Amino acid sequence: MKTILFAVIMIIMVFPTFSSDEVYRDAGAGAFSFLKINPGARAAALGGTCLLNSGDLAVFTNPALLASMDRGYISAGHNQWLGDATQNFLSWNFSLNRVKCALGTRFVYVGNLEMRETATSEPITTFSAWDISFHAAAGIRLGMFDLGIGMKILREKIWMESASGVAFDAGVIIHPISGLDLAASLQHIGPSVKMVEDDFRLPATWRIGGRYSFHFPLGDAAVSMEVGKPLDNTLSAGSGIEYTPQKWLKLRFGMRFLDDSRDFTSGIGLSAGSWTLDYAFVPTDYSLGTVHRFTLRKSL
C-alpha cells in the first residue's frame, strides 16, 4: 500500500512540468465537443477521474464499469457548465442475467450567443446551440476482467446548421489484487461528420487509470489517478481521494493537471435509503466562473 501511495504522489508532482501554453495543433478538429464533458458529479469532484468513478453513469464514460453493478439504478443530473451552458442527463441500469446493461441520454444547451461579422460592440443577432445524444452499453465480468462496449447516436445544431453521427466506446477493468483496479478505455470512436461543407472528426479519446481502495480505523478511502487525451487537445490528468467516514457520507477532493483553467475540485455524497445525492464544486480560472454539478440516483 505504501508503495502505491508513493507512486501516486510522485506522478502528481511530475505531471505539471509537462504543461504547455501553446495551442494544440489539432484544436478545433473534432465535432461534438460536448462528449468531452463527463456528466457525473462524483467523478468531477475527484479531479475528473471518470474512468473508475462514474458508477451508475458508466453508460456515458466507461461501459466496463457496468460489469460490477450489484443492482439496477435510475440516475438523473444537472450541470451548470461554463457561462450559460447547461447539461442535463438521465440513465437507467439493469441486468440481463450475467450481462449488465444501461441506457441513457443527455442534452447540452447554450443560448444567447452573439453573432458578429466585424469588430463591433453590437451583435447582428443572437443564436443558440444544442447537442443531444442517446446511449446504450453493456458490460460483463470474465474472471479478473470486466469488459464493456457501448454506442451512441449524436445530434448537434448550431444556429441553422446541424450534423448527426454515431460513435462507439470500449473499456476494460482489471482486478489484479484486492482493492486495486486498473482500467483503460477508448471513447467516441466513429466516422467523420459533415457540418455545413466541412468534415469533422469525432473527439476520439483514450484514458488509462487506477484506483486503490483501503480501510482504516476512521473509515474507508480510495485514491484514484487518471490520464487521458482527446483527438483535438493535449494530454490531461487528474487525481482524487474519496473518504467515507460513515456509510451515508462521502467526502471528495481532487486535482486537475495539465489543465490551464482548472485545478482543485471537491464535492460530497449523501445517501438515505435507496437515494443518493452527489454534488461537485469545480472552480475555474480566467473569469470562466464556477461549475456546479448535481446527480441524483435511486437504486431499484
Image: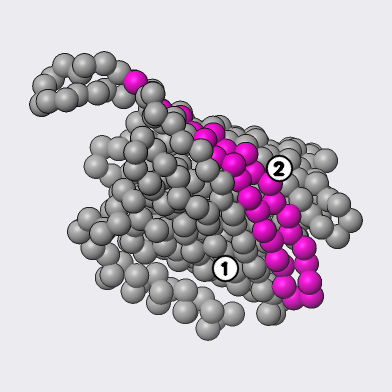
* Image side of residue 211 versus residue 73, left or right: left
| Outermost residue to the right | 97
* Image side of residue 31 versus residue 244, left or right: left
SS assignment for the magenta stretch, majority: strand
Callout 1 crowding tier (Cα within 10 Å): few <14, some 14–19, many ≥20: many
Callout 2 crowding tier (Cα within 10 Å): few <14, some 14–19, many ≥20: many
Residue depicted at x 56% and y 46%? 166
Residue 284 in view of the camera: yes
The N terminus is located in which quarter? bottom right
Residue 16 image point, x, y percent: 30, 67
In depth, the one of 121 and 189 nearer the eye is 189
Any magenta on residue 131? yes
| Residue pointed to by mark 1 | 184
Residue 228 image point, x, y percent: 45, 63
Residue 175 image point, x, y percent: 69, 74
In depth, the one of 288 and 255 nearer the eye is 288
The C terminus is located in which quarter? top right
Residue 42 in view of the camera: no
| Residue pointed to by mark 2 | 103
* Image side of residue 213 versus residue 12, left or right: right
In depth, the one of 113 and 250 nearer the eye is 113
Q: Which residues are magenta?
A: 127-155
Q: Amino acid at mark 1?
A: Ala
Residue 144 image point, x, y percent: 74, 75
Q: Amino acid at mark 2?
A: Leu
**Colour convention of the picture:** one colour
Q: Quadrant of residue 2?
A: bottom right
Residue depicted at x 33% and y 61%? 234
Any magenta on residue 226? no
